[in-house]
Amino acid sequence: MNRYLPSTLYFGFIVSLFGCSLLKPPVEYPGPSKDPFNCNRPAQIAVLNKQELELAGTGVGEFVLGQIDYKSQPELKEVMTRASSDLLVVDYLVCVAKARGDVTSAEQVAYVRLFFSFLQSKPTADQIIKWREQNPFPKDVIEIKDMEVGAEARGRLREKYGLKLFIDMDSLGARHPAALSEVPNGVYTFASLIPDSSQKMYFSDEDDGINPRYGFQQNFELHRHSDGSLYVVGFVSAETADQINKRDRAKNLWVKLYSDQWEKALVMVAIPLAEIGTQKLPRGFDLEGTYLLVLDMLLR
């Protein structure tokens, strides 16, 4: 008798019992995919479905910054609470928050991670509100160049962070909206409108971007540092500079930001996008032949 026959019969019995799945190779799941913000979307997620992950990515900035009513949006609160239990999901949401400009500094990124750690305790809406009151979001530094000539101040700031001019008309097109994720790190560019909460913006055309006579006056300058942080560059009055530079500055401070330097706005500032809460459409005015833009914005 063949001594291998019992083993063969046993294997045949197992296959007949469980079907042919034992003979199939293991299922290979696709790797992480890139989202519109160039962040790695996790390949396998147990805590959220696809729609919930999209909801978390859309709402992470407002949720972390306390710009929503936690009591009136229980669905988002539930999604964020479940997301907090998966480190890969948290990493993804942090990446999205950075790409959108909701957080910029390392301190703010650490705050987001701390917030998600707190959410693992499954807090109520009231407990989240109390936690945020006890742990305020760390404000970013607003860089100020006092009383320098406008063009020189811009040049020094660009040189300090190693920024190069970015104009890519082939991919963006003149005056067409483009996501901020399309702007690479380590560049400066010009925008006729400051990015809003939807992260859309209008880029200046090529002549405006290259020619300082137009680029500085008819557009606002936008900086993206090597770490992905985003800043709007403009000019304010000395009084406004004093107000925004205080460590204990008032919340919800309205600021007039001018696209170029003039006698009532001599101080250049670089304001982190994460600090801008609300903004109005820019207004233009002619200053003795020089056209400037002024933007009213609310600093958080």
Image: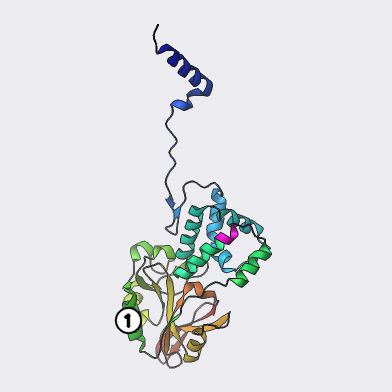
Q: Residue at x 31, y 78 (%)?
A: 159
Q: Residue at x 52, y 77 (%)?
A: 281
SS assignment at label 1: helix
**Quadrant assignment for the C terminus:** bottom right
Judging from the image, the colouring scheme is rainbow
Observer-nearest of 114 and 98 = 114
- Please say if 250 is above or below 48: below
x and y, in percent, of residue 211 in the image:
32, 79
Residue 90 visible to an observer of this rendering: yes
- Please say if 68 is above or below 255: above
x and y, in percent, of residue 45 in the image:
52, 47
x and y, in percent, of residue 249 in the image:
55, 83
> In terms of image quadrants, where is residue 26?
top left
Left or right: 42 as drawn, with respect to 216: right
Residue 179 visible to an observer of this rendering: no
Q: Residues within 10 Å of mark 1 (few under 14, many from 20)?
A: few
Observer-nearest of 146 and 91 = 91
**Quadrant assignment for the N terminus:** top left
Amino acid type, residue under disc 1 in the picture: Gly
- Please say if 75 is above or below 168: above
- Please say if 81 is above or below 297: above
The residue stretch that appears in magenta = 117-122
> In terms of image quadrants, where is residue 208?
bottom left
Q: Residue at x 49, y 88 (%)?
A: 242
Q: Residue at x 53, y 64 (%)?
A: 114
Observer-nearest of 136 and 282 = 136
Q: Report the number of discs.
A: 1
Observer-nearest of 131 and 145 = 131
Residue 39 colored magenta?
no
Mark 1 sits on what residue?
Answer: 155
